[in-house]
Amino acid sequence: MLVAAGYFNLESLWFLLIAVLWIGYFFLEGFDFGVGMLYPILGRDEAEKRALLGTILPVWDGYEVWLLVAGGATFAAFPAWYASLFSGFYLALFLILLALIVRGVAIEYRNKHTGAVWRRRWDVAMPVASALTALLWGVAFANIVHGIPLDARGDYTGGLLDLLNGYAILGGLTVLAAFTLHGALFLSLRTRGELEERARRAALLLWPPTAALLIAFLVWTAIDAASTSAKQIVVLVLAGATLAAGASAWPLAWLRRMGMAFAATGAAIVLFVATLFLWLYPEVLVSSTEGVASPTIFTTSSSHYTLVAMTIVAIVFVPIVLLYQAWAFWVFRARLGREDFEEVKNPLDLLGRTPLGRKT
Amino acid sequence: VGKGAGDRREGFGVIASAALELARWQFAVTTVYHFLFVPVTIGLAWFVAGMQLAWYRTQNERYLRMTRFFGKLFLINFALGVVTGIVQEFQFGMNWSEYSRYVGDIFGAPLAIEGLAAFFLESTFLGLWIFGWDRLAPKVHLAMIWLVAFGTTASAYFILAANSWMQNPVGYKKVGDHAEMTSLGKVFFQELQITHFFHTIAASLLTAGLIVLAVSAYWLRRNRDVELFGGAAKAALVVTLFSSAAVIVVGHFQAQILTDKQPMKMAAAEALYETSSPAPLSLFAVGPWERHPKRTDIDIKLPHALSVLATNSWSGEIKGINQVQSEYRERYGPGDYTPIVGSTYWTWRIMVGIGFLAFFFSLLGLWLVRRGRGLERSRRFTWWAYVFLAMPFVANIAGWLFTEMGRQPWIVQGLLLTRDAVSPRVGVASVALTLAGFTAVYAILAAVEGWLMARAVKHGPEDTVPAAAPGAPLPPLVY
């Protein structure tokens, strides 16, 4: 479609790649955030909590790198976008950074000491940090597409409170709810027995509020985006597809087709982020200031040389990364249950397991 | 920098300069903190990879316990390196948006490549290593930790290429109000970068060596697992000896390059005001407590030594601060181009001094363990091993303060001034808030991490693992 519209160029390619990195980040870390919020609630004792958390422990760090690479790619390919975005969303990003720090430390340190108080504290820190991050990413992206006050140089002229408008808060809550649902479905896929069933019931309960928020946000977006240009029609089609994918999660979960249900919320996240990025394209931020043009991929991009060099690097490394991350996902495919984590007095107790983590 | 930024700054005046100072403090605090963990990660990764290789080759259970014990320390440290690293990447855009606009075309590339080629590698394979003990074949599992070590080292290469470019910009051209890359090869492989990289990796191995030594000393002093920790201590001494030698030798060549590329930094490092031929090496100097003292009160010098070290000739000419200052004024216009002389002089000496101390200390240690005599009997040496635990951290911090403060007032040598690089629209209150926030959270995390580390060290290695037999699955490391 981009080629047909005469849009194909390196700037568009890098915009697409950055969109793909954000899509990857939200798809993969989306369920990590969901698990982070749900494990203290769904896990009724220590062994269950550890089983739930164990589903993301080996992989979360690799998924967070998607964010780092999205940031780095924006810096390399669109320096002026990176500069405006990161300095403009200053305090929001500060809060996100603090939340990401707390979350990372919570995941890594929680199980390194057995004290009850120690674990209880991390069990509070982790869901709060996960929820805050999910919420703020939603707020940030809603603001990017909806428009923020900018000066002629592309610097943000508002404050933190200007970012907390109705549309952005709705976007934040939508993302928060969607990640929680996505996480519940992920857990139902990666656990077994009682935990699997509990995660499935949680997903069924989480679906109605998520659907309501998603519909409200997409309708608002559709009204904003409504026009007869070819691009906006594709945006509306994508928004509709997002809804359809999200909607199918409930019946699939009800029918116990958990793999399909997880794929449905996954597809909804992919389509949702794609909707926002396509709506934005070819702008990179939307200026709400009278007389100030929105910066675009062409006004913010790096030189041709840099884009070509980075394209070659991406062509070499992206497929390799996808291959080994998929392999890691496959290595840890085993479902986990509470009996895998019942208090281990001696690490040797764990030896009776098959390579897939079940007791023989 | 474009005219717009300049106009706006005039309106803010004092407040803008306060915001600049706070942004610099924030960069210093977050970067120094981040770099407490980075060299430990890089150095310990190679140690643990080596230990696991030894186990794989010999099937000696001692090496397995060693791997898992030091692996645990490695993981506790790794987590903080990761979470504080995110701040580093975001910070350029948040506090230094004018810098990002000006140099992003060049500077962004190594950052993006670092994520793509190194961060993915280390994080994904570290997860596989921690949790893959019972799921991967031993040979594949061994490959995981080697890939992690390789990934951490590659990551250092990319970020140091970005930093080397700030010290000595190459492979670029100025286009309007920003710089554009003309050669990625030059950015990645300039001479300064090669020495910068090997110097940092050697310093990382030195840091890890002294950590392994101190931890081993703790158990040797208690006469427990003497065979295991005696072996670890000996390996640590060998690594420390070679890496400190490498730090000194590479550092020497690095300083020669810097004398050529950043004459002001090196003149300040020697408190050398007047251009001299031959130039003496200052061993100990004290001057008035000022930003740019005009004289030194005490200055003990070694004649000819600086000329010999910096130019390989008995009477080579070394430019003094005053001459470089007037040259720069001619080339770049009026202004003060001298860094704070006292801090540059002393951070340089602390770094170099500790490098030499570590060399002689490890030499002494190896002499003590010659022909199989154990360190467990050298109580004085093992006590000093505790003292030497702190030294590499002091040296690492001093080294970076020297590198970055010695470049001031430039953020990119000769190209962009630090005061023109800061985000123009981020207010002083915002920077103050984030500086306070990061400092507070980092302080808490330091306490938590230190406590966990001390606890893991005191807990000691796992007891005998009978399943060390070939082919038997092993439990995941910690969880």
Image: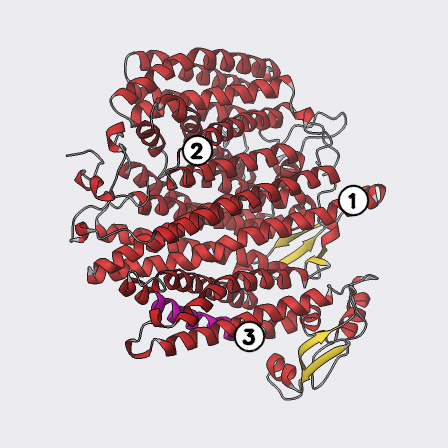
Of pointers 3 and 1, the one earlier in the residue sequence: 1
Depth order, front residue of B84/B183: B84
Where is residue B289? Give x, y as percent: 78, 66
Q: CA distance from mark 2 to mark 1?
A: 45 Å
Q: Residue furthest bottom?
A: B314
B211 in the magenta segment: no
Q: Nearer the viewer, mark 2 or mark 3?
A: 2
Prevailing secondary structure class for the magenta stretch in the rendered image: helix
Q: Please name the residue that numbered disc 1 is placed on.
A: B16
Q: CA distance from mark 3 to mark 1?
A: 39 Å
Q: Which mark is residue B280?
A: none
Where is residue A20? Give x, y as percent: 47, 34
- The structure residue drawn at horizontal position 23% and vertical position 53%, both measured from the top left corner, is B139
- Left or right placement of residue B93 versus residue B117 in this view: right
Q: Nearer the viewer, mark 3 or mark 1?
A: 1
Tell me the amino acid under the disc marked 3: Phe
| Marked residue chain, label 2 | A
For label 1, the SS is helix
- Mark 2 Cα-neighbour bin, 10 Å: few <14, some 14–19, many ≥20: few
Given contact means CB atoms under 8 Å apart, are the residues at marks 3 and 1 in contact?
no
| Marked residue chain, label 3 | B
Q: Are marks 2 and 1 on the same chain?
A: no
Depth order, front residue of A5/A92: A92
Q: Please name the residue that numbered disc 3 is placed on.
A: B253
Image quadrant assignment for residue B306: bottom right
| Marked residue chain, label 1 | B
For the magenta stretch, what is the residue range?
B233-249
Q: Nearer the viewer, mark 2 or mark 1?
A: 2
- The structure residue drawn at horizontal position 28% and vertical position 33%, both measured from the top left corner, is A341
Q: Please name the residue that numbered disc 2 is placed on.
A: A117
